[in-house]
Amino acid sequence: MNLLASNIQNGLLVFVLGMLIVFLGIALIVIVISILGKILHRNKQEPKTEEPEVVVNTAPVTPYIEEGVTPQVVAAITAVITAYYLSNGSNCEFRLKKIKRIH
C-alpha cells in the first residue's frame, strides 16, 4: 500500500513539473520573440537622412499621333495588343481591366 502511494505521488510530481517546464518554456519563447519584434520594428522606423531627389520637368511630353488617328483608335489598338499578350501568357507590364466604349 505504501509503495502504491509513493508511485502516485511520484507520478503527480512528474506531471506537475512537466507542465511547469512546458509552460515556462513557451512563455520564454514568447518573451524572446516579442523583444526581437520590438527591436526589429524600432530599426525599421528610423527616418532616412537622405533628401529626396527633385525632378524638374522641362517640357511636357506629347505623344506622336499620325493625322487621322483619333485617341479612341489608339486606345482600342492598345487594348487589343494587351489582350493578345495576356492570352499568350506574356509577362506584360500593364493589365487591361475594362474596355469602355466612348461615343
Image (cartoon, rainbow, N blue to C red):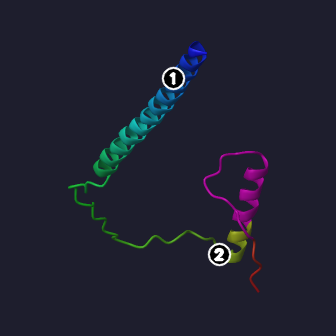
Q: Can residue 61 be seen?
A: yes
Q: Which mark is residue 60?
A: none
**Disc 1 designates what residue?**
14
Q: Tell me which amino acid carries mark 1.
A: Val
**Disc 2 designates what residue?**
67
User: Where in the figure is residue 4, as x and y percent of width and height?
Assistant: 60, 16
User: Where in the figure is residue 65, as x and y percent of width and height?
Assistant: 60, 71
Whole-angstrom CA distance, mark 2 to mark 1, is 91 Å
Q: Are marks 2 and 1 in contact (CB under 8 Å)?
A: no
Using the image, determine if residue 37 lies above or below residue 65. Answer: above
Q: Give the quarter of the image for residue 1.
A: top right
**Magenta segment range?**
77-98
**Residue lying at 79% horizontally and 50% vertically, measured from the top left:** 87
For disc 2, the neighbor class at 10 Å (few under 14, some 14 to 19, many from 20) is: few
Using the image, determine if residue 53 lies above or below residue 99. Answer: above
For disc 1, the neighbor class at 10 Å (few under 14, some 14 to 19, many from 20) is: few
The outermost residue toward the left is 49
Q: Give the quarter of the image for residue 60.
A: bottom left
Q: Tell me which amino acid carries mark 2.
A: Glu
Q: Nearer the viewer, mark 2 or mark 1?
A: 1
